[in-house]
Amino acid sequence: MTTINVDYINPFLIAATKILNDMCSVQAKLGKPYVQSPVFIKDTLVILIGVTGAMKGQVMIAFDNNVACDIASKMMMMPVTEMDDMSRSAIAELGNMIMGNTATIFSTKGINIDITPPTIGNGTMSFSNTYAQNICVPLEYEDKKIEINIAIRGD
């Protein structure tokens, strides 16, 4: 299994913190990265976006449901107490913006990637792959946490 080069992780984190700040007025702080198997428990919402091109793999952005509601509330500028179709669409768009910004950062380094449309999962789920380690980086704000799970490799 391939380990991830830190130069491949930083663009995702730069994009995520920028988009959270710009779209949600959230000042997220980076937690300590760690390797984990992507397993999510019942009250978790996950945005799954694939990466193709010069790098291959996927990124999973995971939120506890209450954190997803908080982020959707900030994006939609109205209270969100449950993840309905509209709030899930807002969260999916957040994933698109983070990954689109990430692709732009990589392109300035001469690395061209494409992203797949987001898939939203909710509940207990697990993922596995054999091509790259999954690196989880927590982004923390207030008393809440968003997990960016990156499992990619460069070709």
Image: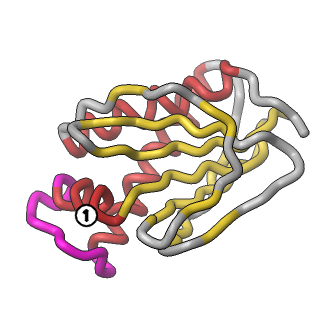
Residue 48: give x, y in percent of width and height.
58, 60
Q: Is residue 84 magenta-colored?
A: yes
**Which secondary structure class fits the magenta region best?**
loop
Quadrant of the image occupied by residue 1? top right
Q: Residue at x 34, y 27 (%)?
A: 29
Residue 111: give x, y in percent of width and height.
71, 28
Quadrant of the image occupied by residue 30? top left
Q: Residue at x 31, y 32 (%)?
A: 28
Front residue of this view, candidates 133 and 15: 133
Q: How is the image coloured?
A: secondary structure
Residue 130: give x, y in percent of width and height.
88, 51
Range drawn in magenta: 74-86
Q: Is residue 147 above or below residue 8?
A: below
Residue 148: give x, y in percent of width and height.
52, 43
Reading the image, the residue beneath label 1 is 69
Dot 1 lies on which element?
A: helix
Q: Is residue 84 above or below residue 66?
A: below
Quarter of the image that includes the C terminus: top right
Q: Residue at x 18, y 38 (%)?
A: 25
User: Amino acid type of disc 1?
Assistant: Cys
Q: Residue at x 34, y 38 (%)?
A: 19
Front residue of this view, candidates 26 and 97: 26
